[in-house]
Amino acid sequence: AGVAEYIRTAELVAFVHTEVAAEYEGRGVGSALARTALDEARAANLRVLATCPFFAGWIGRHPEYQDLLYQSRSKVSD
């Protein structure tokens, strides 16, 4: 019904693309993917980098998951 593509490292999981089949749109499949993936990231003590617009928007609407967001430790600026 849907897929969330990601890249996982020892410290981080980056969600890069989410797709739900047309016949399942509007049925909560994307939300179920996001919630399950983010709960798994939390259980594994991983930070989340949401480069996928769907994941970024979903986290933005669900503040209970915003603590998972990756914060760059780099002090480099332009």
Image (tube, helix red, strand yellow):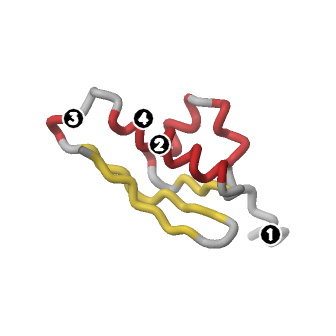
What's the CA distance linking mark 3 and mark 2? 15 Å
Residues packed near mark 4 inside 10 Å, few (<14), some (14 to 19) or many (20 plus): some
What x and y, as percent, mark residue 55?
A: 48, 45
Query: CA gap, disc 1 to disc 4?
Result: 31 Å
| Residue 29: percent from left, percent from top | 33, 36
- Are there few (<14), some (14-19), or many (20+) residues within 10 Å of tag 2? many
Mark 3 vs mark 4, CA separation in Å = 12 Å
Which residue is drawn at the image coordinates 57% and 38% (left, top)? Answer: 59
Of tags 1 and 4, the one toward the viewer is: 4
Counting residues from the start of the chain, the first of labels 3 and 4 encountered is: 3
Q: For numbered disc 1, what is the local secondary structure?
A: loop
Give the farthest residue toward the right.
75
Residue placed under numbered mark 1 in the picture: 74
- The residue that mark 3 highlights is 24
Assess whether mark 2 and mark 4 are in contact (beta carbons under 8 angstroms): yes
Q: Earlier in the sequence, mark 1 or mark 4?
A: 4
- Within 10 Å of disc 1 (Cα), the crowding (few <14, some 14-19, many 20+) is few
